[in-house]
Amino acid sequence: MKTHNLLLLPGDGIGVEIMAEVERIIEFFNGRSDGDSFETTSDLVGGAAVDAHGVAITDEAMAKAVAADAVIFGAVGGPKWDDVPYDIRPEAGLLRLRKDLDLYANLRPAICYPALADASSLRREIVEGLDIMILRELTGGTYFGEPKETVTLEDGSKRSVDTTLYTTGEIERVAKVAFDLARKRGNKVHMAAKWNVMKTGVLWREVTTQTHKDYAPDVELEHILADNCAMQLIRNPKQFDVILTDNLFGDILSDEASMMTGSLGMLPSASLGSPDEKTGKRKALYEPVHGSAPDISGQGLANPIAMIASFAMALRYSLDMGEEADLIDKAVAAVLEKGLRTGDIMQDGKKQVSTSEMGSAILEELGVLMA
Ligand code: IPM
Ligand code: MG
């Protein structure tokens, strides 16, 4: 039996409320007489850290993140910090975590629970049974490329530049993760890029073709233009298994995919680094794909499922607790089956519950499954 060391970073807005539901699940596991347990520490990130320390994440919190077995992250940002300087905006905390821990592989599974097939904005037959994995490169591309700046020109107007930059190595390592994932799923990877317009797109196509040949000829690889991929996701999402794409396209395509699952409140994610040479352990951060939703925060309206499912991903990918992860997923499915819904996935004839009521129902179900 092991004790796992987790850093909890609830962040801003609904991040705080949904993290509270994960803490209850952690307490539940810690109350078991056998099985692994958890030690947790918490810290501030995002706007909360800006308010307290003047930076979106402190060096102390970064050190805790490096030391943890996994980081569990809520959400950051909100209109309150719209006018803080760019370098200390709340999102900078999240981006520093991703970059400094080198979390280059961002797994965003979009699964449509049967009970939610009618909550999607797409027709039931299009989304029912959907199970796709978006693998987003997370530490390169437009998010981090230099130069990234705004300069004032002589006439007083401005010129801004973001740089999209990728190297062979950056593409190759994330492509390998895509092929590894596909082997455990439907054995098919679509690589989405804009090789018809972007030099980085040409490189993505070249490197994934080569990596496929050398590393994973057994997996099916198809290249798809990113704009076509966006369209195909709406037209026929079930044709996809793993979608591999860069940082910016992945941000957009994963929000799009979330609506097929019923709500952005349903989508978890895992961000993984390279395996440590000695221990084989990867640095990892788990977060819901949705943001801090300041419009509904503090009212008990938030859907905690993406956060709870992110915690389940931590059990699966970092802590070797796949069985418990499966049970959490089962508990979520069962609660949805029983007709409990937070506002974002509410449908006629179902019962609307608050954030903590949803958390309680999942916990109760988990108790039954583990008894
Ligand atoms: C996401 C979010 C972040 C991103 C923001 C909060 C910086 O939208 O994780 O998808 O753009 O990567
Ligand atoms: Mg996003």
Image (spheres, grey):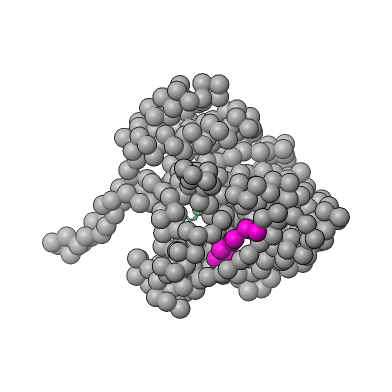
Please state the horizontal and vertical placement of residue 138, each as a whole percent of the image. 45, 47
Q: Position of residue 230 (x, y in %)?
A: 51, 39
Residue 41, relative to residue 332: is it above or below? below
Q: Quadrant of the C terminus?
A: bottom right
Of 338 and 232, nearer the camera is 338
Q: Which residues are magenta?
A: 3-9
**Magenta-colored segment: predominant secondary structure:** strand
- Front position in the image: 91 or 72: 72
> Is there any visible trace of residue 35 in the rendered image?
yes
Query: Which residue is at a point 63% across and 50% down the rendered structure image?
Result: 319
Q: Against 198, is 289 above or below?
A: below
In percent of width and height, residue 164 lies at 33, 45
Query: Residue 294, how many percent across, how many down?
Result: 56, 69
Locate residue 26: give its quadrant: bottom right
- Identify the residue at the far bottom of this view: 52
Query: Is residue 7 part of the magenta span, yes or no?
Result: yes
